[in-house]
Image (cartoon, helix red, strand yellow):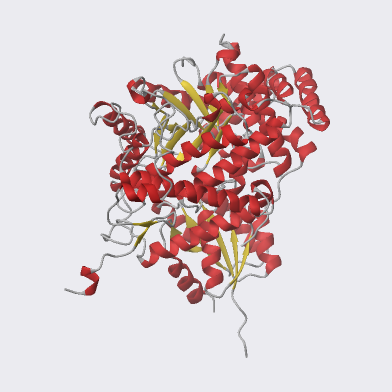
Amino acid sequence: MSERRIRVLLAKPGLDGHDQGAKIVVRGLIDAGFEVIYTGLRQTPIAVANAALEEGVDVIGLSSMAGSHLPFCRKLRPLLDERGLGDKVCLIGGNIPATDHAELRALGFTGIFPTSSKIAAIVDFIKEEVQ
Amino acid sequence: MSERQTKPRRVVNESGIEIKTAYTAADVEATGGFDHIGEPGKFPFTRGIHAEMYRKRPWTMRQYAGFGNAADTNQRFKFLIANGQTGLNVAFDLPTQIGFDSDSPMAEGEVGRVGMAVDTLRDFEVAFDGIDLEQITVSLTVNGSAAILIAMYLVMAQKRGYDVARLRGTAQNDILKEFIGRGTWIFPVEPSMKLVGDTIEYCAQHAPKYSPVSVCGYHIRESGANPAQEMAYAFCIAKAYADETLKRGLHIDEFAGRLSFNFNIFGNIFEQVAKFRAARGLWAKIMKEEYGAQDPGSMWMRMIAAGGGGGLTKEQPENNIVRGAYYALISALSGTQTMALCSYDEAYTIPTEHSARISLRTMQLLIEEMGLTETVDPLGGSWYVETLTNQMRDKMVETMADIDRRGGIVSLVAQGLAQAAVSAQAYQMQKRIESGDFPKVGVNCYREEEEEAKVEFHPYDEDDAKAQVAALDTIRAERDGRKVQVALDRVEADARAGTNVMPALIEAVKAYASVGEITDRLVTVYGRYREPVVF
């Protein structure tokens, strides 16, 4: 029996336009055998939550370089819960200072991959977390 | 000894040129000869656009700065000027760059975060208060909303008594590269091009010393292009803007002299220097031979050679101070007009006063202590550099021809194909760095087990954002609402009629219409860009 491929939503939250990292991760995850839905830039919390629901993804990933990740994730969390997506694996990468990690984890972003993380680390995390 | 030690390893630079162990005059001859070199200040300007270069005046030092509100930014500007900075480069927050007011729901959490928030003319009046706009030239790093902010800058200067016909300054206003990297687009590609044409045409007629566009290879390089491609993309884009402006009946010499460029300086020293020398000759040739420019000023590749962010690392951030010094050296050896450096902490945060001053001192050291201003094009005549200059030119010409063959830059951008090509290369580079094939000190060699570096974070003040919204409320209450509506109606009408919208933007800005209000009217006519996602 062939296994269903892991589906990943990768989103660029807020107004930040630095998408080089996000696009590298998209390519890396596709090469690792995942199905990846990339939203493009300027996603609102509602747009991300709706896309995650409509696409039936296992993993929700955000890439943020411009510092507005905390206010974004605070808004996104209840929207995911309302849609019954509370148990989805959430990860975030980009310019994410260590001082913000504890709050992000508390918001359910258990995978945190700051700038200069390796693609393999993200792949391993997803494989481990998605059962 | 092993074979590895006796046989020289094969070396290929980022642009794909194989590098030899040693060069002679025969290599220069074999790659196109010495004819392209010429003399400084003379066509084809390979050695520099001026005969005396830095003897006459050192490069302008223009660190990128701006955060919070206009008052915070004004303070940082004055700090930089007091420390010897000779130009300003204004960073705007994302809502300003994308045409949202500070009270827009889209601006939540973003007001004043990565640059200063600008809603109305009042913010410009505060930001530049007490700064002599003739002594200090100002560069506005804005693209999607550039036409509005250029109008705002001209109005602010005029109100302060400056003659706009003599006013110098630059706006980035390079929207095509925003679609490829950086991402602060607003309108679809076609009306975006039209707006760039409007600014160039308007400035040619009313503010002829103002540089309305700074074409950026910089961000395309940051997004994954190699050094030769960086220049090729920039030149294709600059030609697209020139073509757009020529459609309005202007002669090339009426505006080409005010087109400027913004390029990146990280990477191999010799490859970068050759890149700039080759590009200068190539641009002069394009302007003279393809566009029939007569005025030497139209043929000059005037540039800011800057940044180097793509070369800096989060690991061992102090190493970035050293990298910055080498990047500044590259910039000086390349004959740049303006220089700016990314500060060592920029992989983490907005530079502090401390780190911004280190960047400034790095450039001042080159001017005062290292002899970089004494002789024009000091690497000229090196067999290696001249050979590489010839080869880099060939690579640029090849890439430009390829872009044209595939339908031209505007079409490639509109389809998302340019974006995909550049990001595919970024992915390849990432794999090379992860495998150790492309060495990066502190990242894939000479690593240390480290805690996250102790970097002083620039604080983000949410109260600043609230104050900005309150100030906007006050302006909305105080301004003449009827005048604003009339001005906004004219913006929309002119956009719909397809005439140059700059006069209408000037009137709207004067009436204290906000960036968001004006943008909304333009969106009504032009629509919003929808990003094609192509991998």
Q: Is residue B332 shown to the viewer in this render?
A: yes
> Is B272 left or right of B250, judged from the image as shown?
left
Q: Nearer the viewer, residue A18 or B477?
A: A18
Query: B175 or B387: which is nearer to us?
Result: B387
Side (left or right) of B319 relative to B122: left
Q: Quadrant of residue B513?
A: top right
Viewer-side residue, B226 vs A78: B226
Residue shown at 41% from the left, 21% from the top: B78
Left or right: B214 as drawn, with respect to B456: right
On the image, the x and y values in percent for residue B376 come to 33, 29
The residue depicted at 29 percent of the width and 49 percent of the height is B24
Q: Which residue is rendered at x = 49% and y = 58% of the image?
A: B426
Which residue sits furthest left?
B1
Residue B528 x/y as whole percent:
73, 44
Q: Quadrant of the C terminus of chain A?
A: bottom right
In the displayed orientation, state which residue is furthest to the bottom. A1
Asked if residue A112 shows in the view, the reply is: no
State which quadrant residue B242 falls in. Answer: top right
Left-right relation of B26 to B74: left
The N terminus of chain A: image quadrant? bottom right
Query: Disc count in the image?
Result: 0
Give the percent coordinates (x, y) of residue B354: 32, 34
- Image coordinates of residue A14 in percent, x first then y, are 59, 48
